[in-house]
Every structure is written in structure tokens, then in C-alpha cells.
Image: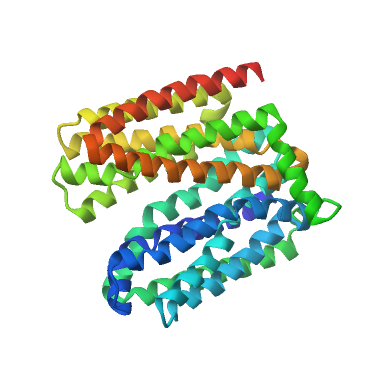
Amino acid sequence: MHRRAVLLLSLASFASAASQRSIDPLLTSIAQSFGTTAGGAAIASTAFLVAYGLLQLVHGPMGDRFGKYRLVTIHMAISAAGTFACAWAPTLAALAVARFVAGMSMGAVIPLSLAWIGDAVPYERRQAVLAQFMIGGLFGFAFGSAASGLLAEHFGWRWVFGVLGIVNLMISARLWFELRANPVNRASQAAQTGTMLEGYRRALALVARPWVRVMMFTVFLEGVLVFGTLAFVPLDFNRRHGLGIGASGAMLVLNAIGGLGYALFANRIVPRLGERGLILAGGLALCTAYVNLAFAPGAAVAAPWLVVAGAGFYAFHNTLQVNATQMAPEARGASLSLFAFCLFSGQSLGVWIGGQVVDQWGTRPLFFVASAGIASLAFYFRGRLARK
């Protein structure tokens, strides 16, 4: 009975990831529409990301209090309204406000979905189910930019938000029907008693737990090292290997293909390697991939290593996710929101640090530092799992 419910949550994750990446190719067109620069138009992207990141900590206790699946459904409907407002925005300021609303609601989807899976799926099956759930977000990140660029090129940037709004609305409606029809979903609401203020106090108290701090530290560094490097892979293909901007960006689809490969075979891989084996295998795969990306003499040699990096990352991150669902079972919404906030914060810091490194020394030193850091992080977390 969980399979359909998880599939719908995965579709919501796809919409969340696609909404985050969809604006990247649109900045020039938006700037032309409102008579500003591309940098000025970037306020629409910044508004989404700020709301997406900062409000992570708000959503979790609300999910614990009112029900996680129910809140994902509501937030998908709010995001549809915000995205439609983007399509009809008369000014750049209005577009930024609409993107803030969309980011605020989309930020709730993934952590609350993870928390619901933690409530509804037994621990021994959870890692394989989470791997299946991740497929949606994986494709959303991979194809959000590509699809929006093609749509904007032929029909204009407003059509991108119109199509995304329709997708969000359809997913929200289907989630609502699932919520009404599936008794497992109603039974998994697991609402807490007490006021919302007490819920936020419980969330803050989680930081005092040693294992929660280990998880926060690990996922923060994962965000710094992995996303702070991956953001500059297209630049590396463009500068060192001579690919065009469009083709360089499309290389990230290979990373998603590697992640999809892991997700498809997770049912077989997880029982054989176990959590500690997956952490070590994923970390070493990422380490090896980044070293080979640094030494690759051409795009044809470098491209397969993006597939390896994708598989390694999802093996590593999937193991972190399944542990995050169990680090505070009585407050899963709050703990998963804290987990997502740390990942997002690490990603933002990693991209900034990566930009400084690339400006000074190029992409190769960034790949080397990331490979060493990821390997060290894998050994660290594997050891913490062994002592847990």
C-alpha cells in the first residue's frame, strides 16, 4: 500500500527540484522583459532559494503537529498558486515575491516526505524505499534546467512557470485523493500533542543529542564537498575540454544517470554491503571520480566518471537519509527539517568556497580537495556508525 504513496511523494520531489533549477536559463529573458540586467533578474532566483533554505526549520514541527503527508499536499497546492503567479507577474518585484512563496512551500516537500517514509516504512526496508523516492528529485535537478530552457526558447519564459504550475496542481490533486483513499496514509499522520511553540522547543532540543550533531556535521560537510564541487563541473567541461555552454550543462544528466542506476539496484546492493559498506563504497566512488575528472584529458574520458560520481553520491546520501529518519523518531518532521537545513547550508557555503578556489586556481585543485575531503568524511561517518 506504500508503493503508490511513495511514488506520488517522489513526483512532488521532482516538482520541487525542477522548480529550483528551472529559473537558471531564464535570467536573460526575464531581464529583457523587465528592462534590467541578468544580475538584477537573479533576485527571482535568490528569493526562491532564501525561502527554500531558511524556512526548512519551520516545516518540520508543523508536520509533526498536523501530519506530514497532509502538509506535503497543502504545500504543493500553495506552490502551484505561487508558480502561476510567477507566470503572470507584472513586475520584477512581483515575480520575486511569487518565487518566495513558491520556494517557501517547495522547501517543505522533501524533508516532510522523508519523515513520512520514516513513519510508515519499517527500518529494514527503508533504505530501498528511500532510494526509489530519490528518483523524482534526481530527475527534477537533471532536467529542470534543460526543459525550461527549451520551453523558454520556443514560447517565452512565462510558459515555463505556467507549465510548472499545472504540474504542481496535478500532483497536489493526486496527493489529496491518495490521502483520502489510502488508510495507511491517514494512520501515518502521527500528530503530536501540545502547541506549536512546544513543537519548536522540542526541535531545538534535538541539537543537544550527540548523534543528531554527528548527522548535522556530516550532512553539512557533504553539502560543502559534493555540491560545492558539482556546481563547477560544467565550467570545467567548458574551459578545459572546449564544450559549449549548453553541452557542458547537459553533462550533469550523466550524474543523474549514475544516481538512477543506484536507485534501480538498491534492493540488491543494500543487503550485501550494509550501511557501513555503502558509506565507504559511495565515498570512495566519489573520491575516485573527482580525481579522474581532474586528470581527464578530454570530455569523452571525463564523462563516464560523472556516472560513477552520481552512483557514489546517492549511495552515500541515501545512507545518511535513512539514518536521519531514525535519529529522533518522536519528532521526525523536525529532525528531517534540521537535516535538510544543514545540507542546504553546506551546499550554499560550498558553492561560495568553490567559486573562490576556481577564480584563484581553477577547477583541478577544487576536485583534488573535494576528493580528499569526501574520502575522509566517509571514513569518519563509517566509524561513527560502527560505534553507534
Q: Is residue 70 above or below residue 310?
A: below
Q: Which of 230 and 305 is in front in this view?
A: 230
Q: Nearer the viewer, residue 191 or 218?
A: 218
How was the colour assigned to the protein in this rendering?
rainbow
Instruction: Farthest residue to the right: give it.
Output: 193
Is residue 240 left or right of 6 when viewed as pictured? left
Task: Find residue 19 and report its horizontal and vertical position in percent.
Answer: 46, 62
Q: Is residue 294 above or below residue 23?
A: above
Residue visible at 24% across and 32% down in the picture = 364
Can you say whether 235 is above or below 172 in the image? above
Q: Is residue 180 visible?
A: yes
Write down the quadrant of residue 186 in the picture.
bottom right
Query: Closer to the camera, 260 or 347?
Result: 347
Residue 257 sits in which quadrant? top left
Number of marks in the rendered image: 0
- In percent of width and height, residue 131 lies at 54, 41
Image quadrant of residue 121?
top right
Identify the residue at image location x=63%, y=33%: 323
Compared across the picture, whether 308 is left or right of 339 comes to left
Which residue shows up at 34% across the image and 73% down it? Answer: 157
Q: Which residue is drawn at 44% across and 21% down?
A: 376
Location of the C terminus by quadrant is top right
Give how far across and how far down residue 385 sits, in percent.
61, 21
x and y percentages locating residue 362 in the rendered image: 22, 37
Residue 149 appears in the picture as rendered: no
Image side of residue 258 versus residue 77, left or right: left
